[in-house]
Image (cartoon, grey):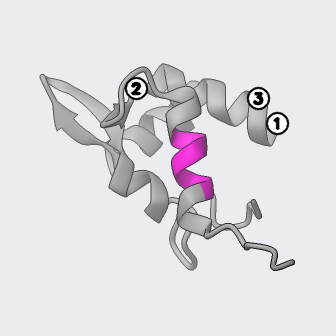
Amino acid sequence: MKTRKKQKSSIYDKLFHKYSSNSTYMTLRQVKRLMKHEFKLVYNSHIMNSFIEIWGKTVDTKKVITKSTFKRLFKKPDGFFRDIKI
């Protein structure tokens, strides 16, 4: 019986879909909830504002994290979540 390995991209997609209200982007509030529940991380508002300004894309006059950007957050050497292993 062969076992299947999950691809990392599917793990990131599952995590993204679990916390996003739609399948295209996550708001800052949803990212904070993901960080608190999944990674046990809490940052102050200044760091989170910098995070959303650096990594966010503008959609309807507000900054959001898109699905493609979310995957890049885990890549070394510059990703925000580069030290987190899933």
In this rendering, position of residue 60 left or right of residue 79: left
Q: Residue at x 61, y 70 (%)?
A: 7
Q: Is residue 56 above or below residue 19?
A: below
Secondary structure type for disc 3: helix
Which badge, 2 or 3, comes first in the chain's sequence?
A: 2
Nearer to me, 14 or 63: 14
Query: Where's residue 27, x and y in %?
Result: 40, 26
Secondary structure type for disc 1: loop
> Which class describes the residues within 10 Å of circle 2: few (<14), some (14-19), or many (20+)?
some
Q: CA distance from mark 1 to mark 3?
A: 6 Å
Specify the segment rendered in magenta: 11-16
Q: Amino acid at mark 1?
A: Lys
In this rendering, position of residue 67 left or right of residue 33: left
Residue 37 image label: 3
Residue that lies at the very extreme toward the left in this rendered image: 60
Residue 27 image label: 2
Comparing labels 1 and 3, the label whose residue is closer to the camera? 3
Q: Residue at x 81, y 79 (%)?
A: 2
Quadrant assignment for the N terminus: bottom right
Q: Residue at x 37, y 48 (%)?
A: 67
